[in-house]
Amino acid sequence: MKITGQTQYIKETNQDKFYNGSAGFQAGEYTVRVKDIEFKDNENRYFTIIFENDEGKQYKHNQFVPPYKYEFQEKQLIELLTRLGIKLNLPSLDFDTNDLINKPCHLILKWKFDKNEGKYFSDFSYIKPYKNGDGVVNKPIPKDEKMKAEENGGKQSKGSLSDENDPFSNGDSLGFDDDLAF
């Protein structure tokens, strides 16, 4: 069967960008490694850490660099580097981003609602250190019914087979009594 059509929502024309999946990771916990570091900010305000799991899925996290305007930004960098095993000579924040490559960790993502898009997206929460002997973790957290309803503008999603309106949900698959002869 030949399929024809045009995209209605996707404006990207480079299909290679979809190789690792457009959504990447949903919220949850994943064992990943730092695959690469990107520097695309002309003003050198941040760098991008590319995390990748054993399935080739990627998550990109922008990390701001010193000097910082707020204490929490400084703390975030120190925590991130510490959890990735990078030793700092505090109070100096000097380090080489190449030292991050191939560092393993457990990436923790949470759901965050984008009011402009009307959808939930996975958002960086924090990373947990990877310890030798840790198994590979792949624990996605699916969207719950409340989140799905919020994305649908408050409308409830279609009922499932476990819905109260399902005539087969009481365990009697055909609606007959148990005392039938056959």
Image (cartoon, grey):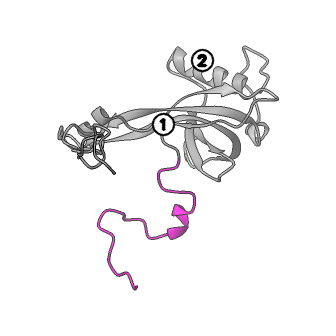
Q: Secondary structure at mark 2?
A: helix
Callout 2 amino acid: Lys
Q: In the figure, residue 133 lies in which quadrant? A: top right
Callout 1 amino acid: Ala
Asked whether, in this view, residue 102 is left or right of residue 141, the answer is right
Q: Residue at x 60, y 17 (%)?
A: 75
Q: Is the magenta region chiefly helix, strand or loop?
A: loop
Nearer to us in this view, 75 or 53 = 53
Q: Which residue is mark 2?
A: 75
Q: Position of residue 91 (x, y in %)?
A: 72, 14
- Report crowding for label 2: few under 14, some 14 to 19, many 20 or more residues within 10 A (C-alpha): few
Q: Are marks 2 and 1 in contact (CB under 8 Å)?
A: no
Residue 173's disc number: none
Q: Residue at x 18, y 37 (%)?
A: 154
Query: Residue 27 colored magenta?
Result: no
Q: Residue at x 50, y 18 (%)?
A: 70
Looking at the rendering, in which quadrant would you find the N terminus?
Answer: bottom left
Q: Residue at x 70, y 37 (%)?
A: 136
Q: Position of residue 52 (x, y in %)?
A: 65, 46
Nearer to us in this view, 83 or 120 = 120
Residue 27's disc number: 1
Q: Secondary structure at mark 1?
A: loop
Determine if residue 126 is in view: yes
Asked whether, in this view, residue 159 is left or right of residue 58, the answer is left
Stretch in magenta: 1-24
| Label 2 vs 1, first from the N-terminus | 1
Vertical relation: 148 (above or below) 80? below
Nearer to us in this view, 27 or 47 = 27
